[in-house]
Image (tube, rainbow, N blue to C red):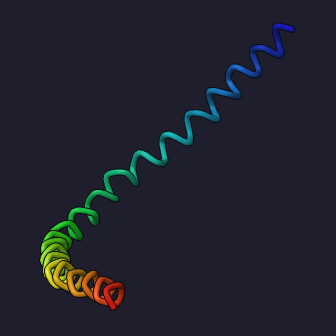
Amino acid sequence: MDISHETQAPSTERSHHPPPIPPIPPIPNSPSPFTSPPPPLNPEITTKIIDGRQILKPVAPSKRPVSERPTQNSSD
């Protein structure tokens, strides 16, 4: 019984050791390329926000005439 316990202990430790070692080196490499996309994404986000605001402006007045149309039809 003691032998089974001794074999399982090192087996589990050995399996847990190799997985965390390989992911550690790629982690610092990932942030490097990730830092480059942030700068170009910033200006894109601002442009998208401006586009969304302009689109919202015409949407508001467009709803006004739409509401009047059904009202006139009802009056008819």
Q: Answer with left or right where residue 35 lies relative to residue 8.
A: left
Above or below, 55 against 3 in this view is: below
Place residue 26 in its image quadrant. Answer: bottom left
- The structure residue drawn at horizontal position 82% and vertical position 13%, both measured from the top left corner, is 3
Q: Answer with left or right where residue 61 lies relative to residue 8.
A: left
Q: Nearer the viewer, residue 62 or 21?
A: 62
In x, y percent, where is residue 4? 83, 16
- The structure residue drawn at horizontal position 33% and vertical position 58%, both measured from the top left corner, is 29
Q: Nearer the viewer, residue 46 or 76?
A: 76
Q: Answer with left or right where residue 42 lies relative to residue 21.
A: left
Above or below, 52 against 17 in this view is: below
In x, y percent, where is residue 48? 19, 77
- The structure residue drawn at horizontal position 23% and vertical position 70%, both measured from the top left corner, is 37
Place residue 8 in its image quadrant. Answer: top right
Instruction: Name the quarter where the C terminus is drawn.
Output: bottom left
In x, y percent, where is residue 2? 82, 7
